[in-house]
């Protein structure tokens, strides 16, 4: 199987909380998109962990083609 797998064709809007850590799925296999659920295990990939700098709404990538992970940069178009 070629990874990352495209998990969606549009970003998902998420409410991030300042200081909270998140694990963004990089492999595309997670059933909890855009977040990691551990499906990458044994695939040689790991999630991208990040901490929200402020409480705000952000669009997280599901196509896995963004150059600004975990955030959508329009690459899905």
Image: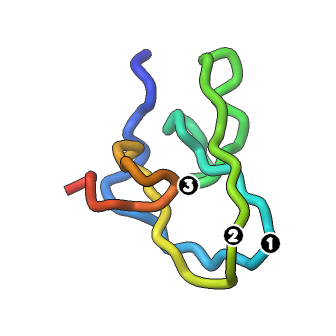
Q: Are marks 3 and 2 in contact (CB under 8 Å)?
A: no
Q: Are marks 1 and 2 in contact (CB under 8 Å)?
A: yes
Image point (68%, 55%), residue name = 50
Q: Is residue 42 left or right of residue 5?
A: right
* Quarter of the rendering containing residue 9: bottom left
Residue occupying the far front of the picture: 53
Q: Is residue 27 left or right of residue 5?
A: right
How crowded pointer 3 is (Cα within 10 Å; few <14, some 14-19, many 20+) is rated as many
Which secondary structure, mark 2? loop
Image point (75%, 78%), residue name = 18
The spot of residue 52 in percent (x, y) is 69, 69
N-terminal of the two: label 1 or label 3? 1
Nearer the observer, 49 or 1: 49
- Report the Cα–Cα distance between label 3 and label 2: 15 Å
Image height of 73 relative to 48, above or below:
below
User: What residue is shown with label 2?
Assistant: 52
Image point (59%, 41%), residue name = 30
Nearer the observer, 31 or 62: 62
- Report the Cα–Cα distance between label 1 and label 2: 5 Å
User: What residue is shown with label 3?
Assistant: 34
The spot of residue 67 in percent (x, y) is 37, 48
Of the 4 image quadrants, the one containing the C terminus is: bottom left
Which secondary structure, mark 1? loop
Image height of 39 relative to 25, above or below:
above
User: What residue is shown with label 1?
Assistant: 19
């Amino acid at each position: 199987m070629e990874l990352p797998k495209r998990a969606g064709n549009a970003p998902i809007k998420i409410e991030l909380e300042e200081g909270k850590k998140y694990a963004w799925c990089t492999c595309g296999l997670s059933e909890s998109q855009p977040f990691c659920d551990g499906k990458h295990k044994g695939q040689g990939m790991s999630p991208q962990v990040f901490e929200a700098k402020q409480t705000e709404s952000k669009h997280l990538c599901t196509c896995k083609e963004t150059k600004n992970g975990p955030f959508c940069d329009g690459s899905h178009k």
